[in-house]
Image (cartoon, rainbow, N blue to C red):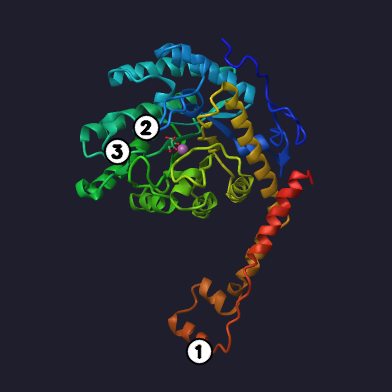
C-alpha cells in the first residue's frame, strides 16, 4: 500500500529550481574532495519523529495527519514500516534510526513486547532486502514508560535496572539482526531530579556497570557496532549524568569506557548545555571521540528541546567544518535527523519539505566548509595566532622542556609583551563571503 501517492522521487534540480519537491543543493552523486555527498553526509531518517510522532506538545494534543493512523496496534506498526520504506525510497536516503518502541507496540509483558518486535524486525529485514536504506543505529526507549520514573541503568530500583538491561540486550540482538552500524545510548532518565533523595555515587557506578555489561553482551553475540553515548544536560531529568561531551568524556574515562564509546552529538542538546553545536563537535573531535550526529536545531528564544529541522546554514557550515576535519569523517555514524516538523506543519508532505530543507542545509554547509579548508581560510589564521609556541620559550613549553624557574627568568627578562588582534570580524566577513559565493554558485 502507498501512503505518499502524490509525491514522486526527490531529485537534485539545482539552486534555481522552483520545485518544492526537489533538492536545490544536495546532489548525492556530486563529489567533494573525492567522495560523494551521500558518502560524506550519511543522512538518516529518525523513525520516531517521522512515523510515530503525533506532534503533541505539553499544551496540546497531536495534530499530525498520517495516512497510516487509520490502523491500530500491530497493524499500525506494519503500516508504518510500509510508509517508512516508501518514504526512504522517495527521499533517496541511505540510513534510518529507531527505538524499540517506535517500531512495535509494547505488550503487557516483556516477552510479549519482544514478540511484537520480532514480527516487525522480520518485516523490516524483508523490506531492507529491496532497499538501499540501511540501519545507521538503533536504541531502546528506557525513559517513556512509568517503570523508568526513577531512571533505568541509574534507577534506585534493582528490578528496573534488570528490566532496562533486558531491553538493551534485545536492542543489541535487533541491531545485529538488521546490521546496524552503531548503537546509541541516550540516558533520558539517567540523572536525578533532586540530590535530596539521590545516592549519586551508586547511580553513576551502576550506570558504568550497565554499560560494561552491554558491551560484554555485544561482544558475546558478535555485534560490532560502534557504541555511542548521546549527551544531554537536562530534560526530562533536572540533571543528566552525561551533561555534555566534556562531562560525558570524564564519566567514560572514570569507568574505563573511553575505548568502548564515541559520542552522538545533538545540536539542540549542545545549546541546552549552554554550548554551541560546533563546540561539542570540536571537543569530541580533538579527543578522537566524534562518532555521529543528531542533526537538528533549537529555537533561539526557547530554552527547551524543540528538535527543529536544521536550516541555519551558518551552523551547518561550522558543523561540517568539524566533521570534515574529523579523522575518518562520520565513520560509522551519520547525520540523523532527530528533528520534528512544527505542530502546525501537520500534513504528510511536510515530512518531505522538512527533510529536503535539512539535507540541502547540510549540503551547503559541506560545500562551504570544504572551501574554507581548501583555501586555508581559518587554519592559516589560527596557526599564525599560535606561532609563539613554534620556537624559543613557546617551543620549550610544548616540548615539556621548562619549569616555573625558567619561566620566571623569561618573564623577568621581558621589556614588553605584544599581543596581536584576534581578527574576529575579518574572519566572520570571510565566512559570509564564502557562504554568499556558494549561494551564487561560485
Ligand atoms: C532526546 C533524544 C533522543 C535520542 C535517542 O532528546 O535526542 O531521541 O536521540 O533516544
Ligand atoms: Co537525539
Q: Earlier in the sequence, mark 1 or mark 3?
A: 3
Disc ID at residue 153: 3
How far from the left and from the top, in percent, is residue 19?
73, 27
How far from the left and from the top, in percent, is residue 133?
58, 25
SS of the residue under disc 1: helix
Is residue 195 found left or right of 427 in the rendered image? left
Is residue 376 found left or right of 66 in the rendered image? right
Q: Which residue is drawn at the image coordinates 66% and 49% (left, top)?
A: 369
In this view, the residue in front, 119 or 344, is 344
Q: Earlier in the sequence, mark 2 or mark 3?
A: 3
How far from the left and from the top, in percent, is residue 347?
56, 22
Is residue 164 found left or right of 330 in the rendered image? left
* Separation of residues labelled 2 and 1 (CA atoms): 62 Å
In this view, the residue in front, 430 or 325, is 430
From the viewer's perspective, is the residue at label 2 or at label 1 nearer? Answer: 1
Q: Residue furthest front?
A: 59
Look at mark 2 in the image and give the residue it sits on: 220
Q: How many marks?
A: 3
* Separation of residues labelled 2 and 3 (CA atoms): 20 Å
Look at mark 1 in the image and give the residue it sits on: 412
Q: Report the quarter where the N terminus lies.
A: top right
Number of residues whose C-alpha sits closer than 10 Å to that of mark 3, classed few (under 14), some (14–19) or many (20 or more): many
Q: Which residue is drawn at the image coordinates 78% and 43% (left, top)?
A: 441
Is 230 rendered above or below residue 27?
Answer: below
* Separation of residues labelled 1 and 3 (CA atoms): 55 Å
Q: Earlier in the sequence, mark 2 or mark 1?
A: 2
Is 102 rendered above or below residue 294?
Answer: above
Is 307 rendered above or below residue 198?
Answer: above
Q: Quadrant of residue 361?
A: top right
From the viewer's perspective, is the residue at label 2 or at label 3 nearer? Answer: 3
Amino acid at each position: 500500500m502507498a501512503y505518499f501517492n502524490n509525491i514522486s522521487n526527490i531529485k537534485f534540480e539545482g539552486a534555481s529550481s522552483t520545485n518544492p519537491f526537489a533538492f536545490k543543493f544536495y546532489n548525492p552523486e556530486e563529489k567533494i574532495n573525492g567522495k560523494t555527498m551521500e558518502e560524506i553526509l550519511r543522512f538518516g531518517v529518525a523513525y520516531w519523529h517521522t512515523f510515530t510522532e503525533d506532534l503533541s506538545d505539553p499544551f496540546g494534543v497531536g495534530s499530525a495527519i498520517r495516512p497510516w493512523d487509520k490502523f491500530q496496534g500491530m497493524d499500525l506498526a506494519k503500516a508504518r514500516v510500509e510508509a517508512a520504506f516508501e518514504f526512504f525510497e522517495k527521499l533517496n536516503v541511505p540510513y534510518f534510526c529507531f527505538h524499540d518502541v517506535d517500531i512495535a507496540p509494547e505488550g503487557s509483558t516483556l516477552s510479549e513486547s519482544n514478540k511484537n518486535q520480532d514480527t516487525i524486525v522480520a518485516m523490516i529485514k524483508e523490506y531492507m532486502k529491496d532497499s538501499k536504506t540501511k540501519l545507521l543505529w538503533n536504541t531502546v526507549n528506557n525513559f517513556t514508560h512509568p517503570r523508568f520514573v526513577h531512571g533505568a541503568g541509574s534507577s534506585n530500583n534493582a528490578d528496573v535496572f534488570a528490566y532496562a538491561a533486558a531491553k538493551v540486550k534485545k536492542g543489541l540482538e535487533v541491531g545485529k539482526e538488521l546490521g546496524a552500524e552503531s548503537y546509541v545510548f541516550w540516558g533520558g532518565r539517567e540523572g536525578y531530579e533532586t540530590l535530596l533523595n539521590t545516592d549519586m555515587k551508586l547511580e553513576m557506578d551502576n550506570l558504568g556497570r550497565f554499560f560494561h555489561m552491554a558491551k560484554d553482551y555485544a561482544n558475546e553475540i558478535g555485534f560490532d557496532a560502534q557504541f555511542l553515548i548521546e549527551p544531554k544536560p537536562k530534560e526530562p531529568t533536572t540533571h543528566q549524568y552525561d551533561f555534555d561531551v566534556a562531562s560525558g568524556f570524564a564519566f567514560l574515562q572514570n569507568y574505563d569506557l573511553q575505548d568502548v564509546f564515541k559520542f552522538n552529538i545533538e545540536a539542540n542538546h549542545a545549546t541546552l548545555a549552554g554550548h554551541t553545536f560546533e563546540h561539542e563537535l570540536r571537543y569530541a573531535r580533538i579527543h578522537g571521540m566524534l562518532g555521529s550526529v543528531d542533526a537538528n536545531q533549537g529555537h533561539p528564544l526557547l530554552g527547551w528541546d524543540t528538535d527543529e529541522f536544521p536550516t541555519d546554514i551558518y551552523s551547518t557550515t561550522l558543523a561540517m567544518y568539524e566533521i570534515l576535519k574529523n579523522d575518518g569523517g562520520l565513520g560509522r555514524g551519520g547525520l540523523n535527523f532527530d528533528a520534528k516538523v512544527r505542530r502546525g506543519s501537520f500534513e504528510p508532505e511536510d515530512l518531505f519539505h522538512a527533510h529536503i530543507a535539512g539535507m540541502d542545509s547540510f549540503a551547503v554547509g559541506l560545500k562551504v566548509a570544504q572551501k574554507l579548508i581548501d583555501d586555508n581560510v581559518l587554519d592559516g589564521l589560527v596557526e599564525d595566532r599560535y606561532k609563539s609556541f613554534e620556537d624559543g620559550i613557546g617551543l620549550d613549553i610544548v616540548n615539556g622542556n621548562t619549569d616555573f624557574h625558567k619561566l620566571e627568568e623569561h618573564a623577568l627578562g621581558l621589556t614588553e609583551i605584544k599581543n596581536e588582534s584576534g581578527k574576529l570580524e575579518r574572519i566572520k566577513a570571510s565566512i559570509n563571503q564564502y557562504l554568499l559565493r556558494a549561494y551564487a554558485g561560485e
